[in-house]
Image (cartoon, helix red, strand yellow):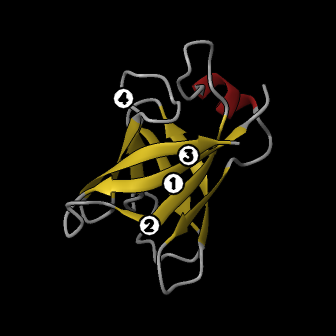
Amino acid sequence: MATITVLLALAAGPGFPEGSPEHRYEIELALDAAGHPDAAAWAADPEPWRARRIVPGAEPEAGDVQHDPDHGWSIRFYGRVAEGPDAPETQFDCGAEPVRPGEHVTVTEPDGAAFAYRVVGIA
């Protein structure tokens, strides 16, 4: 199954009650027939699904998408300090709605802060 790039912009969260279009994620995913991230396609794909975190004043941070059947979807960023195999990752939850422009995704940072991101594009 082919992957697409999902573009997310910060809609709201701690310190950003009005959101911030400059805070973004670009996440490569394959979607199933219902429009949700496809865990089977992720497991079958020999290539990592790329992700980037973009924040003002910093270089984009590169990473890859991970899936765990028990814990869901996350992003592992290269170069972040990890303390063993259970180091926290950036979690993302697409919710019950299909991934499409206008829908929201919850992104939870390793420190537990949760942010709402709006799907602003699919490429």
Q: Separation of disc 4 and disc 1 at Cα?
A: 16 Å
Residue 13: percent from the left, percent from the top?
Answer: 23, 58
Closer to viewer: mark 4 or mark 3: 4
Q: Separation of disc 3 and disc 2 at Cα?
A: 21 Å
Closer to viewer: mark 3 or mark 2: 2
Name the disc covering residue 66, or none.
Answer: 3
Compare residues 121 and 58 and report the one nearer the observer.
121
Q: Quadrant of residue 46?
A: top right
Q: Residue at x 24, y 66 (%)?
A: 16
Q: Residue at x 71, y 42 (%)?
A: 123
**SS of the residue under disc 2:** strand
- Mark 2 or mark 4: which comes first in sequence? 2
Residue under label 2, please give it. 23
Asked whether disc 1 touches disc 3, contact meaning CB atoms under 8 Å apart, the reply is: yes
Name the disc covering residue 95, or none.
Answer: 4
- Mark 2 or mark 1: which comes first in sequence? 2
Three-letter code, disc 2: His
**SS of the residue under disc 4:** loop
Three-letter code, disc 1: Ile
